[in-house]
Image: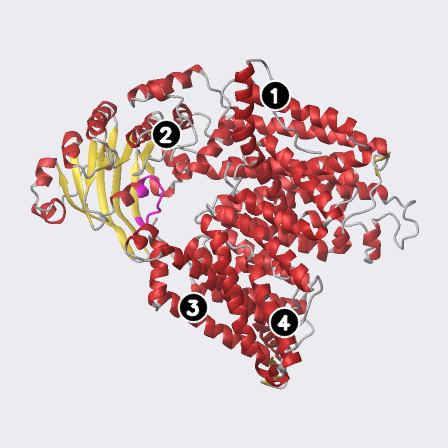
């Protein structure tokens, strides 16, 4: 017995809350991947990352509304289109922002932090002007609404599985782009020695722009996933930015596996504790634990002893 | 190489079977090195031999994986950086490392060994003793006329001298210099050799240098490092004719 | 760095005189008590901005959690005032008279033990300084001893601000929750809501601010101040000159925290309440912009920056609320991209040379060499 629960009940609760946390996990992973790529590769802290995510969420919302009105037959499949468009929208905005703002601020992380915070305020007000201050929700197609029964007491929501599968595909994709493609080789070359990379004919400016765009685009896909767990409003993204930064730092910046593992730990801890405590205390405890561990091990969980 | 049989207390610095590994790579591998009181020791070796890492280990910037570094009866591997400085070890970095936003005077003043605690720094007064010592050192490092110049606008050579001055004002018992003449003009090199010859008269010094002419000018003994180990050690004359050294380093 | 003169250089004494005259004479004469109280509120943010000039401008350490300390100072003050307002007589309609109203609403029947000491004003004043300093010490010691700095420090402080806000909102029985601690009335029987009290509190606040400015300046011109600059440039060189770098950073972080907390306490006194909306991520990062607009290296700039940005915020959000976030966002971007040294930089690069030229041309002393910033 644990508290008022039998062991099997307790296990079921853990499992259910664990699966319920899958979408949060996916949002964290996708957001953190984007942030980690941008920070790791360019030393830029993007405080507006949450707003890029929300752009994706708004695009998903628009798709859902437009498809319901004009193309009801297509409705069951609109989510795929929405995700693609969310990526394109956030990617394009990212490229634009890089060109206007970020490229002037490389290697000044504290300054990028403040400037992108300013950008996030501008974007929030922009969303409010265009979409209104009210939060909007998305209707999911029927096939994503069900759940699979694993045992008598455990049910897994389908949309959670779907989003998680998708997240894994994207994470693998990022891995291949960064570590297995010739483009990734160029990106890493720029990171290690910008001047030399430029000298051997790599267009470093283009590499930077595309990296930033890619990171933002992934945040857009995170926005699509986000519509399943929360309603979309102008300031919804801001609530996620600190959590996501903690995910990146906790995982040890620059390590893909670390980022995923830390997103998993944090989302699962929060989701599980939410069942036993109030939501706010669960969050306080999770964040406190993470901050506490970071104070003891500032390099994060998965970093190496590197020669200085 | 011959392990010295003398008692370690005769040496100001004795390094015994020192190893440090980064992620499996042994940058310094079972290294032993002994420096006498008032000796000028030059460490040479190809790039990546672990020269700078040895200095990092002595001054506490890098923590050893195993082994011991004894300085004047103290075990340095267990001490923190500022404690090692207080014990009397001064270190100059490879690239001139000075405070560009401050003047030459302020650079030297901050290195003056007084008011090193938080409270001490808050109540520190620029008294006659400080001013005289700063001026004395500035004279030695050829910067007497630039005391109130911002350090940022000094030439590369002058910055190197300033950093050497910042060490001198601490009166260290062991001075470690990482490539003190790198990037200097010929005239500056000559002046620097002259400077080092005056300041090193009653002081133990470890120098890392590539410039062979310069090494011959100042070295009492030379240690050649290769792949984190001592390849050869002795007088410049002896080292120069050691076939292994010729093969990996001098290369002709 | 100022070389000659006591505390300030000659030119800085002139700026100091202008500032003191503006705060102590011009403002009180020029505006009514309502507006003056508003200015007093803005000036409480100037405390935080001064702390940030020391910490960020001086030491290169950017904290995105200064709201933590502003809030802690403010809450300490609010707890004292709330206890004084919650006499059994004043709260006799509650199911448990004699405890703050929000506790009663949350079915709490006895005052928590950690509230007890706040019956004492002496304890409260000590707590206003020491509680935030202690918090800063714990965070600072954990981070700086392990050489965490830069963006990591910024993010961790931001996370701590988030945690504290969620905690305050979540524990509403003990903290007043999202509404904060409201309905504060008297300080030792002296009604702080009257016009005369507001006037007196304005002057107390302004004098404290000037005192803090002098304190901050004395730190800056000491060897400690030069060491901070040195650390910002070459931390390793400072370490290998025999200084325990972490201790210096911890001290300046604690000092900035204590200064912010004084601002927070004065905020509570002048505004009459304290709530989590002054603690969290958004207010904390806005406090950074006060220092940035004024010029991150300038103590005077910090005060003008806090005044200007807050005056603009009030004006904008009254008349064009939808434009305010655009303006604020634009301000962040502009300060980083175009004016890294803020107002102080503009004055130094454009205003001072202009007056120097004018002076040279007429070879006579010219009047007021600085445009008045606020109001």
Judge the density around disc 4: few (<14), some (14-19), many (≥20) Cα neighbours within 10 Å. many
According to the picture, the residue beneath numbered tag 4 turns out to be A61
According to the picture, the residue beneath numbered tag 1 turns out to be C14
According to the picture, the residue beneath numbered tag 2 turns out to be B153
Question: Regarding mark 4 in the picture, which secondary structure is present there?
Answer: helix
Question: Regarding mark 2 in the picture, which secondary structure is present there?
Answer: helix
* Quarter-of-image position of residue C345: top right
Q: Chain of mark 1?
A: C
Which of pointers 3 and 2 indicates the residue nearer the eye?
Answer: 2
Left or right: residue B229 versus residue C63 is: left
Residue at 45% x, 29% y is B116
Q: Main secondary structure of the magenta part?
A: loop
* Quarter-of-image position of residue B171: top left
Q: CA distance from mark 4 to mark 3?
A: 26 Å
Left or right: residue C162 versus residue C319 is: left
Magenta highlight range: B56-66
Q: Is residue C351 or residue B149 the one in the foreground?
A: C351
The percent coordinates of residue A19 (x first, y second) are: 58, 75
Q: Which mark is residue A174?
A: 3
Judge the density around disc 1: few (<14), some (14-19), many (≥20) Cα neighbours within 10 Å. some
Left or right: residue C310 versus residue B125 is: right
Task: Please report contact status of discs 4 and 1: CB closer than 8 Å, yes or no.
Answer: no
- The answer to whether tags 2 and 4 share a subunit is no
């Amino acid at each position: 017995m644990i508290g008022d629960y039998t062991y099997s009940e307790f296990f079921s609760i853990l499992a259910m809350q664990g699966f319920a946390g899958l979408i949060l996990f996916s949002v964290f992973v996708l957001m953190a991947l984007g942030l980690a790529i941008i920070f790791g590769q360019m030393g830029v802290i993007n405080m507006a990352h949450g707003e890029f995510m929300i752009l994706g969420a708004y695009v998903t919302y628009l798709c859902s509304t437009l498809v319901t009105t004009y193309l009801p037959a297509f409705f069951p499949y609109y989510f795929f289109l929405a995700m693609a468009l969310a990526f394109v929208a956030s990617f394009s905005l990212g490229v634009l922002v890089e060109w206007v703002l970020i490229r002037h601020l490389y290697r000044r992380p504290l300054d990028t932090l403040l400037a992108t915070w300013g950008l996030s305020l501008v974007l929030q007000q922009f969303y409010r002007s265009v979409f209104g201050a009210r939060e909007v929700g998305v209707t999911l197609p029927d096939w994503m609404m069900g759940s699979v029964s694993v045992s008598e007491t455990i049910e897994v929501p389908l949309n959670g599985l779907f989003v998680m599968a998708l997240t894994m595909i994207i994470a693998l994709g990022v891995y291949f782009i960064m570590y297995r493609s010739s483009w990734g080789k160029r990106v890493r070359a720029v990171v290690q020695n910008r001047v030399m990379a430029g000298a051997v004919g790599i267009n470093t400016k283009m590499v930077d722009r595309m990296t930033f765009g890619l990171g933002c685009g992934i945040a857009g896909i995170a926005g699509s996933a986000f519509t399943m767990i929360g309603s979309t409003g102008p300031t919804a993204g801001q609530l996620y930015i600190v959590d996501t930064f903690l995910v990146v730092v906790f995982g040890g910046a620059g390590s893909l596996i670390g980022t995923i593992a830390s997103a998993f730990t944090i989302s699962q801890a929060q989701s599980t504790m939410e069942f036993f405590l109030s939501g706010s205390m669960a969050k306080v405890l999770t964040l406190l634990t993470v901050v506490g561990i970071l104070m003891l091990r500032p390099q994060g969980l998965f970093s190496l002893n590197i020669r200085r | 190489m011959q392990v010295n049989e003398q008692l370690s207390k005769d040496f100001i610095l004795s390094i015994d079977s020192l190893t440090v590994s980064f992620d499996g790579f042994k940058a310094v591998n079972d290294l032993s090195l002994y420096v006498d009181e008032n000796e000028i020791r030059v460490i040479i070796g190809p790039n990546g031999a672990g020269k700078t890492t040895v200095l990092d280990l002595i001054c506490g910037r890098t923590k050893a994986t195993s082994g011991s570094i004894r300085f004047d009866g103290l075990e340095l591997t267990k001490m923190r950086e500022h404690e090692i400085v207080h014990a009397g070890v001064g270190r100059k970095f490879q690239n001139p490392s000075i405070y560009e936003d401050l003047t030459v005077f302020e650079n030297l003043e901050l290195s003056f060994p007084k008011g090193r605690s938080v409270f001490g720094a808050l109540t520190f007064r620029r008294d006659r003793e400080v001013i005289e010592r700063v001026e004395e050192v500035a004279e030695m490092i050829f910067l007497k006329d630039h005391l109130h110049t911002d350090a940022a606008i000094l030439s590369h050579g002058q910055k190197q001298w300033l950093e050497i001055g910042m060490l001198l004002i601490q009166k260290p018992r062991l001075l470690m210099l990482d490539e003190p003449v790198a990037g200097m003009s010929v005239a500056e090199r000559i002046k620097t050799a002259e400077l080092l010859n005056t300041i090193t008269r009653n002081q133990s010094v470890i120098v890392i240098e590539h410039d062979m002419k310069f090494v011959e000018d100042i070295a009492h003994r030379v240690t050649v490092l290769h792949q984190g180990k001592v390849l050869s050690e002795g007088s410049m004359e002896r080292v120069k004719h050691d076939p292994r050294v010729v093969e990996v380093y001098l290369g002709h | 760095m100022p070389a000659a003169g006591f505390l300030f250089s000659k030119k800085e004494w002139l700026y100091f005189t202008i500032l003191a005259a503006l705060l102590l004479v011009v403002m009180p004469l020029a505006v009514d008590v309502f507006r003056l109280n508003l200015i007093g509120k803005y000036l409480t943010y100037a405390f935080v901005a001064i702390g940030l000039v020391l910490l960020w401008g001086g030491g290169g350490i950017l904290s995105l959690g200064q709201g933590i300390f502003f809030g802690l100072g403010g809450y300490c003050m609010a707890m004292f005032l709330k206890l004084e307002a919650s006499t059994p007589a004043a709260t006799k309609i509650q199911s448990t008279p004699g405890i703050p109203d929000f506790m009663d609403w949350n079915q709490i029947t006895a005052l928590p033990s950690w509230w007890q000491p706040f019956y004492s004003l002496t304890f409260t004043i000590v707590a206003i300084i020491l509680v935030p300093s202690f918090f800063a010490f714990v965070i600072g010691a954990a981070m700086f001893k392990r050489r965490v700095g830069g963006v990591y420090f910024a993010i961790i402080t931001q996370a701590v601000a988030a945690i504290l806000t969620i905690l305050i909102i979540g524990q509403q029985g003990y903290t007043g929750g999202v509404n904060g601690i409201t309905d504060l009335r008297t300080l030792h029987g002296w009604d702080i809501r009257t016009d005369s009290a507001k006037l007196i509190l304005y002057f107390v606040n302004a004098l404290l601010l000037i005192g803090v400015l002098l304190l901050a300046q004395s730190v800056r011109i000491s060897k400690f101040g030069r060491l901070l600059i040195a650390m910002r440039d070459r931390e390793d060189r400072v370490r290998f000159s025999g200084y325990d770098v972490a201790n210096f950073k911890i001290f300046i972080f604690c000092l900035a925290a204590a200064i912010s907390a004084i601002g927070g306490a004065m905020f509570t006194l002048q505004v009459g309440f304290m709530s989590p909306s002054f603690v969290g991520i958004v207010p904390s990062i806005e406090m950074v912009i006060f220092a940035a607009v004024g010029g991150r290296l300038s103590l005077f700039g910090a005060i003008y920056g806090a005044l200007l940005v807050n005056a603009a915020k009030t004006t904008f959000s009254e008349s064009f609320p939808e434009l305010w976030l655009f303006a604020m966002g634009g301000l962040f971007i502009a300060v980083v991209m175009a004016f890294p040294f803020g107002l102080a930089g503009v004055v130094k690069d454009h205003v001072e040379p202009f007056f120097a030229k004018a002076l040279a041309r007429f070879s006579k002393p010219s009047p007021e060499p600085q445009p008045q910033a606020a109001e």
